[in-house]
Image (cartoon, helix red, strand yellow):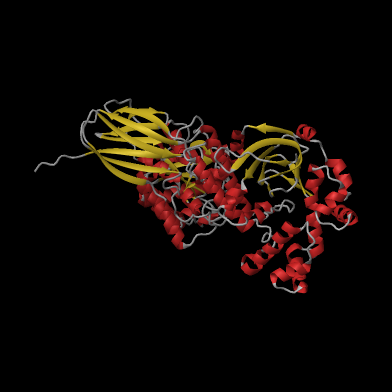
Amino acid sequence: MRREYVTFMEQLPIYINLDAIEDYPLHWHNCLEIIFVLKGTIFVQMESETYELREREIEIVNADEPHRIYSNDFDNKVLTFKIDLDFFEKYYNDVKNIYFYTNSSEEGVQEKEKYQVLRKFLSILACEAIQKSDDYDEKIEEEMIKLLFHLLNNFHYLIYDEEDLRENEVQFERYHRITKFIYNNYMNKISLKDIAKREFLSSYYLSHEIKNMAGTNFMDFLNSTRVHESVKLLLDTEKTISEISEEVGFSHTRYYNKYFKMYYKMTPLQFRKKNYIQEEKYERAKKLKEIPILEAIDYISYYLEDYDRFNYKKEIVKIEADVSSNIGKLNNYWKEVINLGDALELLKEKEQSFVKDIQKDIGFEYGIVQYLFHKDMRIYFNENVDFLNWNEVEKLMEFLVDIQLKPIIILDKVFENIDAFLRLIESFILYFEELYGIEEVGNWKFRVSKDLPKEYILAAQEIFDKYQLEDIVEEPFIEDENVNFIYDTSYMVPYIIYNFINEKENMLFLKAYDTVEENSVMKNELFFGAPGLTALNGIKKSSYYAYYFLSKLGDELVSKGDGYIVTSCEDNYQILLYSFTEDINKLIDFEALSKKRGEKNISEKEISLSIKNLQYDYKVTIYEIGEKVGSAYNNWISMGRPKRLTEEEVEIIYNISKPKISLHFAKKKPVYNLISKIQGYGAVLITLQKVQKHLF
């Protein structure tokens, strides 16, 4: 039997499966089917048309609509959703008489937002079915209701190509009544006059209305319906062609043959001979392999990046820290240097305000400054100019001195003439030695760029020796120009923390703030994969707070392990907890973010922290940052990923993109226990500050 009756998931109005399909012969279901191609290419034959579906594309097959799925590439993965229309009927009357339509033929059309939203709904349904987390059945039904109204509002057969119908409810309802009447009565002898009478319209006016609605005249629309409905009788019964012709409403077999050939390019008899299969052979003709649905996660995780329930399985981690122990000094080299980028950008008032905040919150010792001696800084015009103008450079150096940030100046080959280069370097030293004194200038560092020739370095070093300055750092500074959207996300929090406390990476590819470069790919004005700690408009990214948390650690190391570090400073203690996976030391691509979450089970971790041997009472301050708490990127996603932000929206994101802070009190006791949580990628900083005893 070609009409298949679907058995839905237990207690749920849906069935979801993943298959590799070579050929699934013509058949139809008692339900709505949505086909989502995850890998490879397939073809879907519906009625007289065949559509090619590539990766990420979607097709909707309506209830009782004959269709065949086949592929020349058996290395495909197709996620199908079969939905019980009785469930939809509870929330929208007459849904069984509504047809949904997707565009599978126009190149690029499925990149529109409504398709992206549809993919997300389907991904959430699959995610819940796979994970079976708490209340997953209720969540699936909630998402199915949302899916229903998304389909009605965006894929309804009447409004897909006629957007104006959204605003014309009277016309919309009329078209639906007409279509419903034809589909329910095509087998009878109905006429344009019958419908006109029902709608209180003239036949002439109705004829034009149907042409507008269906793109064809009334008789052609009626006969095409009869033809397409006859396919099920040809394949699923042994009735004669004459019997079928009469049953679907044709007055004579001759007309049935004529219209059938118009749509299928063959007669009904030829179609039956080509496609009819006895029931036992039909089952053998199905060439498909069921795949464990868990494999779908790798393909749909991209659409689940901001879905709270994706792989958040509760995991309890026990950590014990004896604060009476001490295993040595902590090397807090994360505070040594920050990349300030282009000198010209650093002259701007807005960018200087960003750096001031960084110094106040974190307090770096050095800042890398690039292109300080370039023409943009108005020092010179050509190699023959004797007088060098240091006014712009002075403004920059004065700013750095004021905020107590020593420069690391990158030396690059600004002149082809080595003598002009040396004159530039010596003039700089003499000018600022006179302005600030040799002691201040002696604290500054100079580092070579990758393009500075060896003879330039050796000659410049002689000048540095002459003025008793530090040796030039000869390890070339190489600017990382990569764009990676992972920089904007909370993945950077545990990545930065892990690499610094384990001394794996110096993070010089990260910069103080975002700038728009030639290789920038901007699809919005806030997040475009730049490596700054601060976005263009001053909003602090999650990476900013990774440094902020590190800056609050003490000087002595008490304990360290996977996902945590405990430090002390005199009688005060600091505990830093962070998301940990085996490869958190690696900088992944943005596209792999959600997939990594699925593979490595970045979950909601409940951490039971037991602190032993507290000798005093303590004020406990807890700071939390991560995907669900204080992340500017996730807050932006929650706003609908706006391309541009109003001043009010910028202010809102700025104000909410901060760590969550809570206060507690810990009395002196042998063991103080604290329960904390990290959701997804993030970190929690806990500081214990000794409470001073006051005598009265």
Percent x, y of residue 18: 65, 36
Seen as rendered, the residue at the extreme right is: 254
* Residue 450 makes an appearance in the image: no
Vertical order, 33 against 561 (above or below): below
Image coordinates for residue 311, horizontal then vertical, percent: 50, 37
Q: Quadrant of the C terminus?
A: top left
Q: Residue at x 48, y 62 (%)?
A: 646
Specify the quadrant of the image occupied by residue 71.
top right
User: As rendered, which of 488 and 518 lies closer to the eye?
Assistant: 488
Quadrant of the image occupied by residue 274: top right
> x, y (%) of residue 478?
55, 40
**Quarter containing the N terminus:** top right
**Up-down: is 412 above or below 674?**
below
Residue 166 drawn above or below residue 582: below
Residue 440 placement (x, y as % from top left): 36, 45
Up-down: is 40 above or below 159?
above
Q: Residue furthest left?
A: 696
**Residue 604 relative to residue 217: left or right:** left
Q: Is residue 619 visible?
A: yes
